Image (cartoon, grey):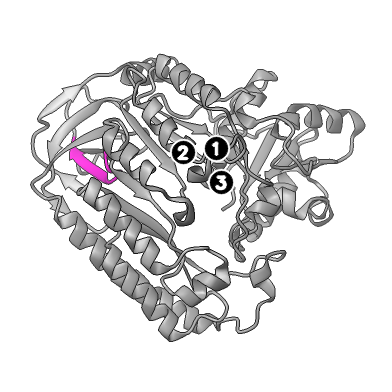
Amino acid sequence: MNVHDSERIAGLLEDAGYAPVNPDETADIVVFNTCAVRENADNKLYGNLGHLAPVKKNRPGMQIAVGGCLAQKDQGDIVKKAPWVDVVFGTHNIGSLPALLERSRHNKSAEVELLESLEVFPSTLPTKRDSTYAGWVSISVGCNNTCTFCIVPALRGKEKDRRPGEVLAEVEALVAEGVLEVTLLGQNVNSYGVEFGDRFAFGKLLRACGSIEGLERVRFTSPHPKDFTDDVIAAMAETPNVCPQLHMPLQSGSDAVLKAMKRSYRSDKYLGIIEKVRAAMPHAAITTDIIVGFPGETEEDFQETLRVVREARFSAAFTFQYSIRPGTPAATMPDQVPKAVVQDRYNRLIAELEQIMWDENKSQVGQTVEVLVAVGEGRKDSETGRMSGRARDGRLVHFTAREGVRPGDIIETVVTYAAPHHLNADGEILSHRKTRAGDAWEAGKAVKTKGTMLGLPSVGVPAPLPQVNACG
């Protein structure tokens, strides 16, 4: 979701007349689009701002803007801690950035503007997309859940849903541009429809995406187990272009911890959903999020998490050590788990997951996979001669490259080797289909002006400073 917001920021800046710069050139404007989910986001932001302070001092007129969730959380504190920041904007007023930059320049002072509710649904803003073959499409913003560890509802607000017609119109427009794959985005996609009173709206939306000619892959993130219904499973299984992939956050396998987290489901329900998904789509790849060391978590609770992990057999997992986020109920809970204990449990969880993911990937050896060659992942490695992309189930596949294969094209190949986090296909490419997305990538490469678009996570800063990345 933050990456998609960054694409909108880039689109706004381009529409306002700003141009890209080379990574080795000094930018006139540097924009940080921040996250607030984990503590290291704060450290990363203020560390990067510190690096830029002497640069700005030696470059009159340079502007620095900070937006996103951390800006919404810290608000005016940002300019107190880093008085060389020119603009602070929040999650609800991304569209104000060009005007705030101009106002700051005119007034020669910092401009801090943060709204408490959404001003304009972000998808109405111009977008500078990073990819010719894949696009993010927001179906909702905000969240109505009250998970005790999560600060997102306080920063993104209550759930706001787009009407299905608006979503489908955006998808159709992307496909008309050559996009092959769309990911539907929401803090809780399967509660989509709550605003207009249709609890089956998300399943209907998936089926509607299936009727869009030229749309080859549909993904979505993230659902919440408490809202996951059988009609969504049926829609996934019965809609050919919906990928056999499900990212469904677990957070903990302990019912006691789930209750303390206010997650509104228990481990049996979670495993039951996975069982139904695999019954409908036997080869579906299921991924998850897990938090270790939530306040009050005992060794017995942690063992329950390991039990669910073994039963669920995830193909990948995003794992987190719990960190206190000020403003959340969990921050003031008793029985905070000591850091050393959290680290030990985290290490054991990783070891368990690595073995399971490796075993699951080994089951793919010998299988023919359809790979959408990816930008970034799609670059040829000069040492191995491989390119990379994603299979329909989301697995990363490195394959032996051949002349003419471009990011955005689709190839078929056979998996020859499995590692915990990727697959290798070192044999012949069985088929290669050139696509309009690949044509667009090739055309863009031919005419591409030097540099990186201001406002994207990678922003031009002068050497020897490191590349500046979006926090979180």
Q: Distance between the residues labelled 2 and 3?
A: 38 Å
Task: Give whichever of 383, 94 is nearer the camera.
Answer: 94
Q: What stretch is highlighted in magenta?
A: 392-400
**In the shown orientation, is residue 396 left or right of residue 441?**
left
* Picture residue at 80% right of the left edge, 40% below the top: 86
The label number, if any, that marks residue 193 in the structure image: 1
Q: How far apart are marks 3 and 1 (CA)?
A: 34 Å
Rendered image quadrant of residue 126? top right
Q: Can residue 459 be seen in this view?
A: no
Task: Give whichever of 458, 439 is nearer the camera.
Answer: 439
Pair 2/3: label in front? 2
Image: 410 above or below 353 = above
**What residue did someone put label 3 on?**
469
Task: Give the mark nearest the N terminus, 2 or 3.
Answer: 2
Q: Within 10 Å of the Cα at label 3, are there few (<14), some (14-19), or many (20+) other Cα atoms?
A: some
Q: Where is residue 167 in the image (x, y as percent from the top left)?
A: 51, 26
Q: Within 10 Å of the Cα at label 1, are there few (<14), some (14-19), or many (20+) other Cα atoms?
A: many
The label number, if any, that marks residue 200 in the structure image: 2
Q: Position of residue 353 (x, y in %)?
A: 31, 66
Image: 49 above or below 179 = below
* Picture residue at 79% right of the left edge, 27% below the top: 99
Q: What residue type is labelled 2?
A: Phe
**In the shown orientation, is residue 242 left or right of residue 417?**
right
Q: Distance between the residues labelled 1 and 2?
A: 7 Å
Q: Can residue 156 be seen in this view?
A: yes
Task: Give the mark nearest the N terminus, 1 or 2.
Answer: 1
Q: What residue type is labelled 3?
A: Asn
Pair 3/1: label in front? 1
